Image (tube, rainbow, N blue to C red):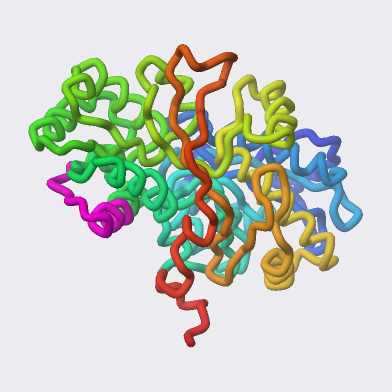
Amino acid sequence: MKIKALMATAVGIGLAVAFAPNGVFAQSNDGPVKIGVLSDMSGLYADLGGPGSVEAAKMAIEDIGGKVLGKPVEIVTGDHQNKPDVGANITRQWFDVDKVDAITDVPNSGVALAVNEVGREKNKIMLFSGPAASDLTGEKCSPTTAHWTYDTYALANGTGAAVVKSGGNTWFFLTADYAFGAALERDTTNVVKANGGTVVGSVRTPLNAPDFSSFLLQAQASKAKIIGLANAGGDTINSIKQASEFGITSSGQKLAGLLVFITDVNSIGLQTAQGLQLTEAFYWDQTDETRAFSKKFLERVKHQPSMVQAGVYSAVRHYLKAVEAVGSKDSAKVMAKMRETPINDFMTKNGKLREDGRVVRDMYLFEVKAPKDSKAPWDYYKQIQTIPGEQAFRPMDQGGCPLVKKG
C-alpha cells in the first residue's frame, strides 16, 4: 500500500543523517536511537498532538543533551490520517526499513490499537501519549507498551464522577464511532451507575463530523440532565459550539466534556466553554516548572501545550534516560529500567510505569473560568481537585492484562 502520509523526515536537532540509495534512512543495528512521532498532523487532533508533539519530542531530546549512547538522537514523523491501516503500515516501514526504535504520541485509539500489535510483533517500544482507550493496558496490553498520559478510565473517574456527585444523575452520550468513543462511554457508564446515576441512551457519531444537530436533538429529546461528550478534538469543539447555538445548554441540560484539551477551550472561547469541568494530567499554569516548560513551548508552537504534548516530552525523556542508563536499545532492558525508575519531571512527580504498561500519576479536575475571571491569555482553568494516581487509574488486577501476575 502506498502511504501518501508517510513523512519519514529527520528533523533538525543538529543531526547528521545518512541516506541509503533508495532514499530511506540507513541504520545499522548499533546505530543511533531513532524515535518516530506518529500523529494526526492536519486533522481534528492536530492541535492537541500533531506538530506540537514533534516539538515536544525535540525539546526532550535537547534537554538530555541531544545524544544517547554517544550518538545524536534522530526523529522521524508521520501522519496516520486517523486510519488504523495507514498507522500500521507507517509503523512497519519505520521498524523494518528505517530502524526506528520507539514510537510516541498516536492520538486516535483505533490507530493506537493497530500500531500496538505491530509493536508487540516487532518487540519495539510504544510510548503512547495521545490515545485514550484503557484497553491498551487491559486485554490489549503489551510488554513493550507504555500508556503515558491519561486514559478513558481516569477521565470517567474524574469528570464523570464529579458531574454525577454534583447532581447530574441522568446521562445521554454523544459517542465517537470508534474504539476511543466506545471505551470512554463504557468506562463513564460504569462510573455513573456506581454513583447511583442512570444512562438513558446514546448515539454514535462519525469521526470528524461537521454537523452535530441531529445527534444533539436526540440528546435534547432524551431529557437527560447531562449530555456526555465521548469525543475529542474537533468533534468536541463542534458539539459544544452547536449545543450553545441551538440553545440546548441554556434550556437546562448540561454538557460533560469527557475529554477536553486546553486547545479545545481556546477554540471554543471562554464565553461558551465557561463552567465545563474536565480532567487533565497537566495544565501550563500549575507550578513554576510547568510555566517554564510551557513558555519555551509557546515560543516554538505559538500555543500552550496540551497534556498530550506535555506527555510526549515526558515519555521521550524518560525513555532516553533509560536507554542511556542500561547502555542499550534492547526493548526488554529499557522497559525494565523505565519501570524501576520513578518518573519525575515538570508534569509528573513520583509517577510509576506499571507492569501492565499504565503510567500512574496524579490527575486533576479543572473547571473552565468565566471570561471575567481570566486575567491573561490562556488563563482558562481553575483547579478543583487533585485525584491521586492510585484513585484515578484502574487497579492493575482489574484490567484483564495477561502480563499481570495472578495472586
In the displayed image of the protein, which residue is found farthest to the bottom?
Answer: 407
| Residue 15 shows in this picture | yes
Q: Position of residue 356 (x, y in %)?
A: 53, 69
Q: Quadrant of residue 140?
A: bottom left
Identify the magenta region.
186-203
> Which residue corresponds to the image point at 51% horizontal and 78% vertical from the top-left?
404
Reply above or below: 379 against 183.
Answer: above
Q: Position of residue 273 (x, y in %)?
A: 38, 23
Q: Position of residue 330 (x, y in %)?
A: 74, 69
> Which residue corresponds to the image point at 50% horizontal and 56% vertical from the top-left?
115
Q: Is residue 31 magenta?
A: no
Reply above or below: 164 against 211.
Answer: below
Left or right, 73 with reference to 161: right
> Which residue corresponds to the image point at 81% horizontal and 45% vertical from the top-left?
18
Reply above or below: 136 against 7.
Answer: below
In the displayed image of the protein, which residue is found farthest to the right?
Answer: 70
Left or right, 251 with reference to 68: left
Left or right, 359 with reference to 230: right
Q: Position of residue 111 (x, y in %)?
A: 44, 50
In the displayed image of the protein, which residue is found farthest to the left?
Answer: 221
Q: Is residue 201 magenta?
A: yes
Number of marks in picture: 0
> Which residue corresponds to the image point at 85% horizontal and 66% vertical from the top-left?
327
As rendered, which of 87 and 162 lies closer to the eye? 162
